[in-house]
Amino acid sequence: MPKSASPSTGTSRLLDAAGRKALELKPGANDVSRLSPGVYFVCEAQAQAVTKVVLAR
């Protein structure tokens, strides 16, 4: 997540392919090492945007 995003702008979540919350995202680096490889979606509440992310090892 860009560091310029502030917590007051809303929350961002990482969802798995089934739509379940996998991780609550914070500005800056986020540790995704515990997540399984696959397709995830970043949902930004304030921007009402969804971005597809692929985690590969």
Image: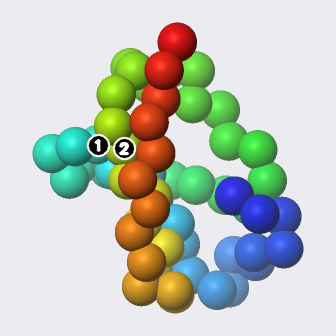
In this rendering, would 7 be left or right of 45?
right
| Circles 1, 2 touching at the beta carbon (< 8 Å) | yes
Residue 39 seen: yes
Q: In the rendered image of this protein, does residue 3 appear above or below residue 25?
A: below
Residue farthest along the top direction in this orientation: 57
Residue at 52% across, 12% down: 57
Q: In the rendered image of this protein, does residue 22 appear above or below residue 13?
A: above
Q: Amino acid at mark 1?
A: Asp
**Residue 9 horizontal/vertical position (percent):** 64, 86
In this rendering, would 9 be left or right of 22?
right
In this rendering, would 5 be left or right of 16?
right
For label 1, the residue is: 16
Tag 1 secondary structure = strand
The tag on residue 42 is: none
Residue at 34% across, 28% down: 38
**Residue 50 horizontal/vertical position (percent):** 40, 69
Q: How is the image coloured?
A: rainbow
Looking at the picture, tell me which residue is in the foreground, 52 or 13: 52
Q: Residues within 10 Å of mark 1 (few under 14, many from 20)?
A: some
The tag on residue 40 is: 2
Q: Amino acid at mark 2?
A: Tyr
Looking at the picture, tell me which residue is in the foreground, 1 or 10: 1
Looking at the picture, tell me which residue is in the foreground, 50 or 20: 50
Residue at 50% across, 53% down: 24
Q: Which quarter shows the N terminus? A: bottom right
**Residue 42 horizontal/vertical position (percent):** 45, 58
Q: For the residues marked 1 and 2, what is the alpha-carbon distance in whole angstroms?
A: 5 Å
